[in-house]
Image (cartoon, rainbow, N blue to C red):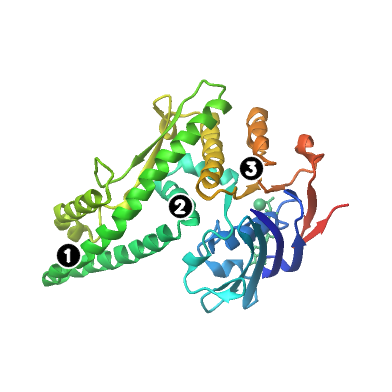
Amino acid sequence: MHLRELILRNFRNFDHTELSFPSDLIFLIGENAQGKTNLIESVFLSCTGRSHRTSKDREMIQWEKEEAYVRTKVDRKLGDSSIDILLRAHEKKRVRINGEPIHRLGELMGHLNSVIFSPEDLKLVKEGPVERRRFMDMELSQIRPKYFYYLQQYNRILNQRNNLLKEIQSNPSLAKTLPVWDQQLAETGSFIILQRHAFNISLQKIAREIHSRISRGSEQLSLVYRSSIPYQDAALEEIRQNFLRELEIRQKEDIEKGRTGKGCHRDDILFHINGMDVRLFGSQGQKRTTVLSLKLSELEFMFRETGEYPLLLLDDAMSELDSARQRMLLEYIGKVQTFVAVTDQDQFPEIRGRDSQVFQIRSGTAVPEG
Ligand SMILES: Nc1ncnc2c1ncn2[C@@H]1O[C@H](COP(=O)(O)OP(=O)(O)OP(=O)(O)O)[C@@H](O)[C@H]1O
Ligand SMILES: [Mg+2]
């Protein structure tokens, strides 16, 4: 996959910028608060229809403006495409692919894929399960539009069920309508669980290999997918039945609490190094290595699933890594079109000589060097 062109209008601190990227290695160099992450964000938005750092589209629209516009042109094995995203302050965003409006955001998925890596990704191993569910969801949504649809539906149904649970507290006769929601929740939820299960198995194989290389054979990384719905055979119908049973068993408690206690919204992944839980016992370095292994595994996973590498977006990701880990990351640069945002001109002398493009990012402008 190759991002050939990026046009921004009123996107964050960029008024109007048109950039083309003939190269596979692009450096975005600038001091703090100049717009490096904003540029990366605009690319991520074109991939997923969302920002990687805010859930509020409006924040991406330049202050005092009504609309922001991002256009990308992408070269792919299956042909070229253009993606237009119009963010509007008071209305829903509009997305066009090759000039044709799409009606559901899921249709955008897969046209431009990316893996983003920034120091904040350390949250993946440090913080609570929300980050790890997001990790699975971002990856699976990009390669399987159906997953994205089911996830959206699941979240909608979950919300409605939770509202109903609260209403039942004051009006118990409403409890008879619960099974309708339970059925739908189990239907969409079992699909999601099965996909996550398979994803973790594939990712684990790749991550183990990569992690072993980074740690020079001394560490074995494993991923353990933890769903709050038990299953044995990982068969869709089995999971659906168990899901329903869990909802029934917990019904009283759910009503008391006014929320649904079991389901994919409670899933998690455990990361183990040589059998030890990295989140609880891992050193800072082991946590960083784990995240790097996961990110590189995402690239490989997408390649195996789609036949094309996604874009790699590195937002200040190198500064936190020691030289051995940096080298590992650099191995991938070259296979994959990579955007590297950095503050320091002199970082990575090893790769600056390669066929790369450099943009100086200064208060919302990107000026090509040379
Ligand atoms: N909606 C917006 N409209 C206009 N300017 C914005 C908007 N949102 C953010 N900015 C500005 O963008 C700048 C931050 O840009 P960005 O986060 O891309 O910086 P950066 O170059 O990545 O810096 P760092 O090296 O610190 O990460 C800030 O100056 C901020 O005020
Ligand atoms: Mg930044």
Q: Is residue 151 left or right of residue 215?
A: left
Q: Are marks 2 and 1 in contact (CB under 8 Å)?
A: no
Pick out the residue farthest to the front: 78
Indicate which disc, 2 or 1, sits on the residue closer to the N terminus.
2
Q: Where residue 283 is drawn, which disc sits there? A: none
Q: Are marks 3 and 1 in contact (CB under 8 Å)?
A: no
Pick out the residue farthest to the right: 370
Please tell me which residue is depicted at 60% across the width and 46% down the height of the picture.
118
Three-letter amino acid code at the position of disc 2: Leu
Residue 84 x/y as whole percent: 62, 70
Three-letter amino acid code at the position of disc 1: Pro
Rendering quarter of residue 99: bottom right
In the image, 352 versus 309, the foreground residue is 309
Indicate which disc, 2 or 3, sits on the residue closer to the N terminus.
2
Q: Which residue is mark 3?
A: 317
Q: Where residue 140 is drawn, which disc sits there? A: 2
Name the element at disc 1.
helix
Pick out the residue farthest to the left: 173
